[in-house]
Image: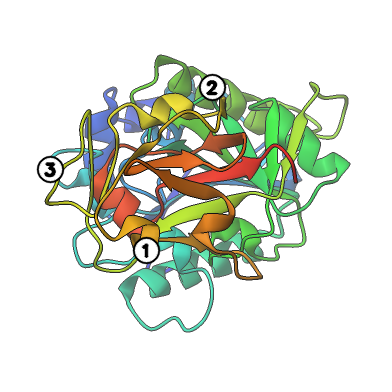
Amino acid sequence: MSVLKLWRDPSPEDVDPHVNGFLQALQHPTVIALTGRDTSRHRVLVTLLHGNEPSGLEAVHQFLLSGEQPAVNVSVVLGSVHAAAAEPLFYHRMLPGDRDLNRCFEAPYSDGQAVLAKAILDYVRSCEPEAVIDLHNTSGSSPAFGVGIYENEEVMALTGLFVDKLIVTELRLGSLMEQEFGAPVVTVEAGGSADDAADSTAREGVRQFFTLKTLWSEHAPVTVIRKSRRLELQPHSRIDYADRPLHDRDITLRADVDSFNFRLAQPDEALGWLGEDGYSHLRIGGEPGRSDVGDFFEERDGCLFPRDTMQIFMATTRPDIAASDCLFYFVMSKQ
């Protein structure tokens, strides 16, 4: 536990009443361990893996202030505390120069972020959990949804505690949800950090995850989406967001591109503008096989269009996140 600070059974009086003060009091990546009414079982919530995603932390903060005892033992793992606490609060996905923590959950564990990821893995496995939730915000405004690598009743039940959509992905990026814990794992994207609904989605889902006696009873219907892909920026390419093409950028996406999240983008809807090198600054990333950008997108009159109807999700309007992660994920309507 040298990398992760352990805070066991804090009382409401131990917790700063304001979430910003609660964050700053943590000081280090932290495990909050709560004793449940049934101590024979354990559930794990991982959140704040990215410092700009506060809804999970806010949901945990509210639960701790309530003083309610969880149904079973619960561990809350708070990862990117340093990034979240850097000014301005909740802005930095990771600190400058650091790797994305949620891309470090696989060997080699050779830098500080990877060492932290390995400590989180070891702790979660030591709990022998019956379920694991990894709670995030999306980088742009978006409806809430879940992501998993398996499609079974336990995964559907976990997803249904929070949201009504599950993306089952074949992409392997070194994320927490790809790891084996001997238990179902779901990533929940509660919506954008500026979306009013995101905090309430996180709060209600966390409350149920902590307090339900069983997680595997009947659950709300969940729509499953399959075969997602990522549109990524090539290394050293330059991107920005605007209402017109920016000629000092290789790619300019629409300033409102996140308005496409979870709606169908049509072939006649421009997503942005391309520089003189066309879409050579883009790539399809993360999938087992190789695809060309031109398989899914086309250039017309200097603009980037979908080649066919597609559903877009996790579109961001932050250039730094687009460059370090991806522009967005997408699913073709005709697979």
Rendering coords of residue 213 (x, y %): 78, 29
Q: What secondary structure is found at the residue carrying circle 1?
A: helix
Q: What secondary structure is found at the residue carrying circle 3?
A: loop
Say the numbered circle drawn on residue 201: 2
Q: Nearer the viewer, mark 3 or mark 1?
A: 1
Identity, as a three-letter code, of the amino acid under mark 2:
Thr
Cα distance, mark 2 to mark 1?
Answer: 39 Å
Q: Quadrant of residue 149?
A: bottom right
The residue identified by callout 1 is 280
Cα distance, mark 2 to mark 3?
Answer: 26 Å
Rendering coords of residue 99 (x, y %): 33, 66
On screen, residue 31 versus residue 28, left or right, reads right
Give the mark nearer the N terminus: 3 vs 1.
3
In the displayed structure, would residue 305 be above or below residue 237? Answer: above
Evaluate if marks 2 and 3 touch, with contact meaning CB atoms under 8 Å apart: no
Identity, as a three-letter code, of the amino acid under mark 1:
Ser
Crowding around mark 3 (Cα neighbors within 10 Å: few <14, some 14 to 19, many 20+) is few
Identity, as a three-letter code, of the amino acid under mark 3:
Glu
